[in-house]
Each structure stands twice: as C-alpha cells, then as structure tokens.
C-alpha cells in the first residue's frame, strides 16, 4: 500500500525518486536549471547596468548609452560599481563625481556624463585618472580591490568605444 509516497512501513519510497533524479541528471535537467539561473542573473545585471547609466548620464545621447551597455556587458561591471543584485561593490570614481556635485549644492543635476559624447569622454577620463592616481592611500579589502580593477576595465572599455564614435 502507498499513500502520498509513503510505503507500507511508513518509510518514504526513496528508491523510485532516487532513480528518477539520476535519470534527470543524466538527461541534462540540472544543466538546464543552471542555464536558466545564469540567464536570470544576466538579466538582473543588465537591469542594474541600465539603472547605473540612468544615474550617471540621464541626458547623454543614445549612442553613449549603447556604448555604456556594451562595455558593461563586455567587462561584467559598470561605472558606478552596482552589481546584479543592486548592491554597490564599492564607491566608484563616477559615484564620487556624483557625490561631489551634491556636496557643491547641486540638488537637481547629478548628470556625470553630460549631454554629448565629448562630455562623456571627459568624465570617463577623469574617473579613470582618479582611480589610477588616488589622492590618499586607503587600505582596502581584497573584494574592493578586485571591484576597483573591474571598474578600471570598464572605464577603459567604455572610453575606447566612446572614442570610436
């Protein structure tokens, strides 16, 4: 007798489910689920890249946005250090530029990239320079050091693509 997967002695019927799971693994079901999760993670990252762009350059031309998204996808990082889950990995140089605008009393215009390709190039060059030449040495965790390396890779890729426009 069997009621809801429990055998006669009250023990679960594990043999059947174990064999079924073994066949699922062999047939690639597990690989499919991993692929679905990876695609979902890529979608979340792309959403965060777009949100980061809207924070950095809401008035920038479409070609600047396209280049930003291409560089973010290529490097798997964006200029504001916002990860796929929406959390910041560290305070990036473009975020520092944004915060400096706030400290100067600019409450409405947090646009870092400006409204032209040339202004985006200048902002990116400044961010890259500030990243590579810090004013003060500050000890950082390994995770932050790695995030800053990715930030530099993003700026270089973004700048290279901007200069081709």
Image (cartoon, helix red, strand yellow):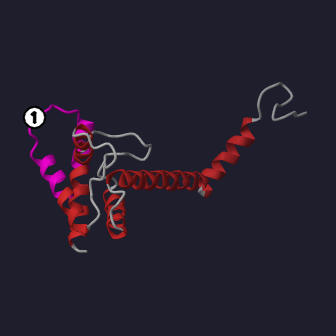
Rendered image quadrant of residue 65: bottom left
Would you name the residue on which mark 1 appears? 137
In magenta stretch: residue 138: yes
For the image shown, how many numbered marks are present on the structure?
1
In magenta stretch: residue 65: no
Element under disc 1: loop
Q: Residue at x 10, y 34 (%)?
A: 137
Q: Position of residue 126 (x, y in %)?
A: 15, 53
Query: What secondary structure prevails in the magenta region?
Result: helix
Q: Residue at x 11, y 42 (%)?
A: 134
59 or 22: nearer the viewer: 59
Q: Residue at x 44, y 43 (%)?
A: 85
| 48 on left or right of 97 | right
Q: Which residues are magenta?
A: 124-150
133 or 148: nearer the viewer: 133
Q: Position of residue 155 (x, y in %)?
A: 23, 57
Q: Position of residue 3 (x, y in %)?
A: 87, 33
| 148 on left or right of 57 | left
Residue 41 in the image: above or below residue 134: below
| Outermost residue toward the right in this view | 1
Assess disc 1: are there few (<14), some (14-19) or many (≥20) residues with their C-alpha within 10 Å of its C-alpha. Answer: few
Residue 108 in the image: above or below residue 8: below
Q: Position of residue 146 (x, y in %)?
A: 24, 43
| Outermost residue toward the top in this view | 9
Q: Quadrant of the C terminus?
A: bottom left
């Amino acid at each position: 007798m069997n009621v809801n997967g429990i055998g006669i002695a009250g023990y679960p019927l594990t043999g059947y489910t174990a064999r079924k799971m073994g066949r699922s693994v062999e047939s690639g079901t597990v690989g499919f689920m991993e692929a679905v999760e990876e695609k979902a993670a890529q979608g979340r990252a792309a959403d965060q890249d777009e949100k980061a762009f809207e924070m950095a350059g809401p008035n920038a031309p479409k070609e600047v946005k396209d280049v930003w998204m291409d560089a973010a996808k290529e490097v798997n990082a964006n200029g504001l250090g916002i990860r796929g889950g929406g959390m910041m990995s560290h305070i990036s140089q473009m975020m520092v530029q944004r915060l400096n605008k706030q400290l100067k009393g600019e409450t409405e215009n947090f646009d870092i990239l400006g409204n032209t390709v040339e202004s985006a190039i200048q902002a990116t060059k400044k961010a890259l320079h500030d990243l590579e030449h810090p004013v003060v040495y500050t000890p950082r965790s390994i995770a932050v050091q790695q995030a800053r390396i990715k930030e530099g890779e993003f700026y270089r890729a973004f700048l290279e693509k901007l200069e081709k426009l």
